[in-house]
Image: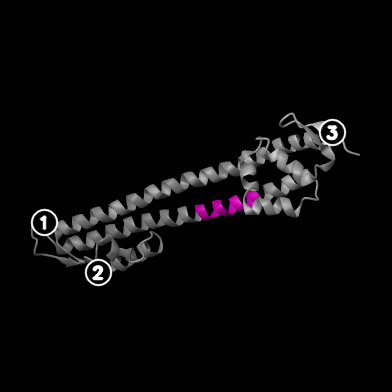
């Protein structure tokens, strides 16, 4: 038997007998009580969860949707955290190693003597700095890319190299700060989605009573 009820979303009459479980979930998501899960439900992964479980209880579908969303966001958060840790360590290593390189290089040059130079590629810290720049700080060609291939330097040129390396590390740190904010946003989204589940559950119970 068909039962005509008032739709609590828009106040219209509807034939509730045709309202299946997936439709109830979609109506709840469209109600505005769960914007995060609604957005996820419109992704390919979210659509798959709803379509594959349309025969299940609406509350179970919401639980599955939340679980999939949480899994997806947790993977994103893990990758973000790993990247932040790697790059932060890289910045620290470059600063330390470059300081060692400068200490060694300064032994071979003199202020004001432009003709007295040092080949920094012969210094022990050079290859270490190069490796960290390539592996952790996004420079495929390492220190040569950063210093435009220059390896011979007098006192003033060493100071310029120091400024270049420091500026690069500062720029990368700005990116790390942005990643840290993105990580916080991801974790906030996960927690908010859990709160939305409670709101959706209450709304679904209301809709289910109309069938």
Q: Earlier in the sequence, mark 2 or mark 1?
A: 1
Look at mark 2 in the image and give the residue it sits on: 121
Q: Please tell me whether residue 142 is drawn above or below residue 32 in the rendered image.
A: below
Inter-mark Cα distance, 3 to 1? 91 Å
Q: Is residue 74 above or below residue 118?
A: above
Rate crowding at label 2 as few (under 14), some (14 to 19) or many (20 or more) other CA atoms within 10 Å. some
Tell me the tag on residue 4.
3
Number of numbered callouts drawn: 3
Residue 164 horizontal/vertical position (percent): 25, 55
**Pointer 3 local density, CA inside 10 Å: few below 14, some 14–19, many at least 20:** some
Q: Residue 73 colored magenta?
A: yes
Which quadrant would the C terminus be assigned to in this image?
A: top right
Q: Estimate the x, y position of residue 73 in percent, counting from the top left.
A: 59, 50
Quadrant assignment, res 121: bottom left
**Which of 180/67 is in front?**
67
Q: Does the magenta run of residues contain 123?
A: no
Which of the two discs, 2 and 3, sits closer to the camera? Answer: 3
Q: Which residue is mark 1?
A: 111
CA–CA distance in space, label 2 to label 3: 82 Å
Residue range corresponding to the magenta coloring: 69-80
- In this picture, residue 173 sits left or right of residue 57: left
- What label does residue 164 carry, if any? none
CB under 8 Å between callouts 3 and 1?
A: no
Where is residue 166? Give x, y as percent. 28, 52
8, above or below 109, in the image:
above
Q: How is the image coloured?
A: one colour
* Quarter placement of the N terminus: top right
Q: Nearer the viewer, residue 150 or 50?
A: 50
Q: Residue at x 55, y 53 (%)?
A: 76
């Amino acid at each position: 038997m068909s039962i005509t009820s008032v739709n609590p979303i828009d106040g219209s009459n509807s034939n509730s007998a045709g309202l299946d479980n997936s439709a109830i979930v979609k109506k709840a998501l469209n109600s505005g009580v769960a914007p995060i899960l609604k957005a996820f439900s419109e992704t390919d992964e979210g659509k798959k969860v709803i379509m594959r479980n349309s025969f299940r209880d609406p509350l179970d579908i919401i639980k599955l949707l939340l679980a999939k969303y949480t899994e997806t966001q947790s993977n994103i958060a893990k990758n973000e955290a790993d990247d932040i840790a790697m790059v932060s360590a890289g910045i620290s290593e470059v600063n330390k190693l470059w300081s060692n390189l400068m200490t060694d290089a300064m032994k071979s040059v003199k202020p004001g003597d432009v003709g007295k130079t040092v080949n920094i590629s012969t210094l022990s810290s050079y290859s270490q700095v190069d490796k960290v720049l390539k592996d952790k700080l996004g420079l495929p060609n390492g220190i040569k890319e950063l210093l435009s291939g220059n390896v011979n330097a007098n006192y003033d040129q060493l100071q310029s190299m120091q400024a270049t390396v420091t500026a690069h590390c500062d720029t990368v740190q700005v990116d790390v700060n942005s990643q840290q904010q993105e990580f916080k946003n991801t974790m906030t989204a996960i927690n908010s989605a859990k709160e939305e589940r409670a709101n959706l559950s209450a709304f679904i119970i209301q809709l289910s009573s109309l069938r």
